[in-house]
Amino acid sequence: MSELEIRAHVASSPGALGGAARRVSATELITALLSLFLLTAAIAPQLVAPGDPLAIDPLSAFAAPSVAHGFGTDESGRDIYTRVVHGTGNSLLIGAAATAIGLGLGLLLGVLAGTLGRAVDFTVNRLLEVLFAFPGLLLALVFILIFGPGVATATIAVGLSTAPGYARIIRAQVLSVRSSAFVEAATVQGLGRAGILTRHILPNTLTPLLVLGTLGIGQAIVWAATLSYLGLGATPPAAEWGAMLSAGRTYITSAWWMSFFPGLFIVLTAVTATVLGRSIERRLRHA
Amino acid sequence: MTAVIGPDAASPLPLFVRNLSVSFGTAQVVRSVSFQVAAGECLAIVGESGSGKSVTARTLLGLAGANAAVRADEVALGGRSVLGLSPAAWRKRRGRDVGLVLQDALVSLDPLRPIGREIGDSLRLHTGMGTTARRRRVIELLESVGLPEPGLRVRQRSGELSGGERQRALIAAALALDPPLLIADEPTTALDVTVQAQVLELLDDIKRRGTAVLLISHDLAVVSRIADRVAVMRDGDVIETGPTRDVLRRPQHPYTRRMIAAVPGDKPRGTRLASTATAADRAAPAETVHTRERRAPNAPVAPRIALEARGLVKTFTRPDGSRVNAVDDVSFRLEQGTTLGIVGESGSGKTTTARLLLALTTADEGCVEVLGEAWSTLSEAQRRPRRATVGAVYQDALGSFDPRHSVGRILRDAAGAGRRRRGTPHPRVLELLDSVGLERTVHERRPLQLSGGQRQRVGIARALAGRPQILICDEPVSSLDVSVQAQVLDLLDEVQRELALSMVFISHDLGVIQHMSDHVAVMQHGRIVETDAAAQVFRAPTQAYTRQLLAAVPTLPLE
Amino acid sequence: MPRRPAPDDSRITRGVPARSGGARLVMRVLGAVGVLWLVATLTFFAVRLIPGDPAQAILGGPGSQASAEALAAVRAEYGLDQPLLVQYLAQLGRLATGDLGRSYALNMDVGPLVMSQIGGTLLLAVLALALAWLLALSLATWSTRGGGVARRIGSGLEIVAAALPHFWLATSLIVVFSIWWGVLPPISTSGAIGLVLPVVTLAVPLAGFLGQLMRESLLTALESPFVLSARARGESERGVRWVHALRHAALPAVNLSGWAFGSLISGAVVVETIFARPGLGRTLLNAVTVRDVPVVVGVVLIVALAYILMTVLTDVAARIIDPRLRLA
């Protein structure tokens, strides 16, 4: 069982965001705007936060949130809002990379298990069971134990941790399509195994991937930030959200804003990703 | 408010409705209907899907839904009005003045609770009876509905009972407080024919004991068994009402006449069940039938065996390890150009037989030959080039289409035709659409956007795409409304004659089988119990089971 | 509306017992042992990938300037000069007797170390699970009562809750409750009051997930035919929920409790660190940071064991609640 499976399951429930709607709902509009904001912050942060994230200003260190510094300043006087916005790119990149790793690996394992017969399925299933016995971050921690801390290792670690979840979902989808009535009808028509794979199984398996990936990115970002927070991922002064939070740990009693706002952005991104994933799922289903 | 309504003050009418209208938003679902039911009488409301009959039934219990707007001159249960009742007041009346029986007791009874509790709920809510008294009454009720071993059943859950037993338990639950009125919404639709007959007997019994019964159904024949009066609903209106025999023998309204004409049964093959629709009568434009041009049938072929099954055996292992013979030594021959009807109840093995004929599963023993050559004994690679000879039409048309494909794509793939430029459909696709009476514009649409009847037509077109010589139809019309069913059966009939197809037609519906088949095989528990020419089997069956089946089938009392 | 008769499988469902509960339990236990063995194997070989000389690590790390004799002695003692397969079998043998090795950094046997820490984590996990269930159930019930507005609010709250990272929630709670309002201690002291913030931090995101599932199945249950039958008998709205719908709503959450437990243990790593509580999570993090391999392996194995046990328990619980599963 993985967090991803639950998110995917809930996203595909009929009541997830109301029934079919042709028009764009208010929620979707807000989600779209937020996504746009986040993407802009990632690609061209100067548009949203002009200023230098590394600019030191010791005189205004530890300034509380004000008009001049919306999110306050950190111990070196750097504007937190600017740093948070400029950190979006890093964090999203890490999340996307981890998701890509997990999704790619999961796709490979899931399709292999679903199409190559009992023996392969059995082996892959046992492998997945073992990986699931490392709940949550534990697998990532073991990976970091072996390969040492750092941004790259943390990213790969998160990707590996999410791969079993993806693999199981994709395997279930492949098996479901294989035993479906329309695949049987295709067999009756004389379509061969290769044809069924390319015409029916793969297309019907790849479509949910977009939704899965979107749901997964939020989760990946949270986990990557957690690892950074624990000192095992990105380290300050990198403007990555988790690292900023880690730096803010020491000053929590005096300057709460150092930890709060980066974390807020993490939550915002994760929520946006979840709602986006659900909207896409709904639209695709009713297409 | 109003005084007691009824023939005399001492015995108010269990149900009295005048000018009831129900709408959801702007959609008017029930328009000004009026009817009444007296004690010991059964009124049946008959209609197809979308007629508003189920909404009417639920409205009589105040359960039409939160967004339903209900207006009426009067609705009275047991002589007392229920218009404008508060939720608390409604709760006191439900179960006491009226009981509800729904379709499919498997989901109409809480699958997690023992049925004893479900039945005892009414007693718990409305009376002050203690646990022991309730339990005694529940066992009494189960006996009165004919459930064997009630003491044992009380502790079981709905999934542990058979279909018929579950339905009886559901009826017992509705009758717990001995309400004057029982509303039954499609109570036998999910049941096998023989079980259905028993449950109808039970309802008849209940009626004779003095309860008024309001029966909702789509099946005229079922209704004719126990209903004293019939009201036919269509699009929210009651278009005809009267004593059952009168309405069924001398229907006044053209819609009623069409409904009766659409019921297959002993109508000879070749009789059109559906009349060509006039524009004014058609309800939804999506159902417009493009009248197909009838082509001259090909020259008759010399009889030859199109398909032969010999000694087919297929066993499955149940979860607990025991084995069940799904198909047990089944043999038959299909002569070219004819239709073999395979009929049986659930668990008879007919679906497994269909899968064996289509080589979707391999038989444990026995073989199938197609056009005199090996079929089931071949490997899939050897069989694949010949698969075009056998086409299939399925019960769940929608499920048999890839959800991502358009109709055009589905037919193109089936015909093995290449892609065309965007927007220009392949001529073969258009040809196929014509042959099943669908408009050419349908090729751009997705199956989800079509109606049930249209989808099945696409299914038939798909089956014909490979120019098969044999067609296997597995319950092709079971999910369709009667009038749509009639059209699809007519289409199958025409197509078969024009293309000289040999057809295996599988169904649980004896009327459909009787209408469509030249030969019939009756299956029970995996074996063929009786097989003969259709006329023989239906008029002079030799086996006890066949006779039992035929006796259980409700038929329309026409002359 | 499909008109096909439902398959009358009375022959199958009536009176024919499924494989007996005892046999099934034995199979599960065997399966669990199998998974544990695979986990131990995987960790054994994974750990061999760590760069550096294990003998040196045992003696205190690369900067310890250990002499060649000391290194040789350690290698002999720990069997590090044996062929890989022999080492593997020796490790399995040790695990079978419960010997989890000795910590590099803490000069303690891993077994007793883990056992001393596991209590703290289990306490947090169990309390958090209970609180999460309570929150999820309340939110699900409340949000399905009213109309669309309550539903949207409930759904929104759940999505946000599920997206909260533990570390952020923990620090925010500390800021609000300890620093501003001063009602709760920031670092866990002994006693129940020190449990409040850590348990809430763990429970809220989990409640978000469970709540989403519960609400979905609650809504499905409320629209099902058996609830209509119940209403037709005069059952009140409250009765419908408590007597019927809730049991159905709880089913998926019960199935999930195994995963939930695992997720809580994972969250405990962060929570124990932030609140300075003793427990496996903090132990694990420290061990990873200093590369104390035996401790990491020991904790991982114990966690895997606990997780698998929890999964078996959840399975049993699900079967008790839903008798339909017993027939499958």
Image (cartoon, rainbow, N blue to C red):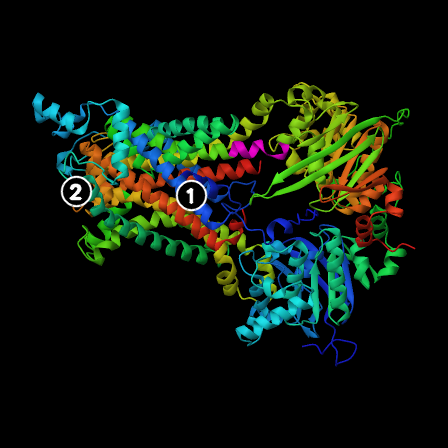
The residue tagged 2 is A251
Q: Is residue C138 visible?
A: yes
Q: Which residue is mark 1?
A: C28
Host chain of mark 2: A
Q: Chain of mark 1?
A: C
Residue A14: percent from left, percent from top: 53, 45
Residues drawn in magenta: A173-182
Q: Position of residue A160 (x, y in %)?
A: 35, 30
Pick the residue in front: A76 or C114. Answer: C114
In the rendered image, residues at marks 2 and 1 fall on the same chain? no
Q: Quick check: A228 above or below C279?
A: above
Up/down of A213 relative to C49, above or below: below
Label annotation for residue A110: none
Residues at marks 2 and 1, CA–CA distance in whole angstroms: 49 Å
Inspect the magenta stretch and tell me whether residue A179 lies in it.
Answer: yes
Mark 2: secondary structure: loop
Which image quarter: residue B6? Answer: bottom right
Q: Which residue lies at the image location 70% right of the left edge and 48% below the top edge?
A: C3
> What residue lies at 24% left-to-right and 52% top-to-bottom?
C176
Q: Nearer the viewer, residue C324 or B439?
A: C324
In the picture as drawn, the residue positioned furthest to the bottom comes out as B10
Under tag 1, what secondary structure?
helix
Work out whether residue C251 or residue C200 is closer to the camera in this orientation and state it: C251
Classified by dominant secondary structure, the portion drawn in magenta counts as helix
Residue A235: x percent and y percent? 22, 31
Left or right placement of residue B504 versus residue C239 in this view: right
The tally of labels here is: 2
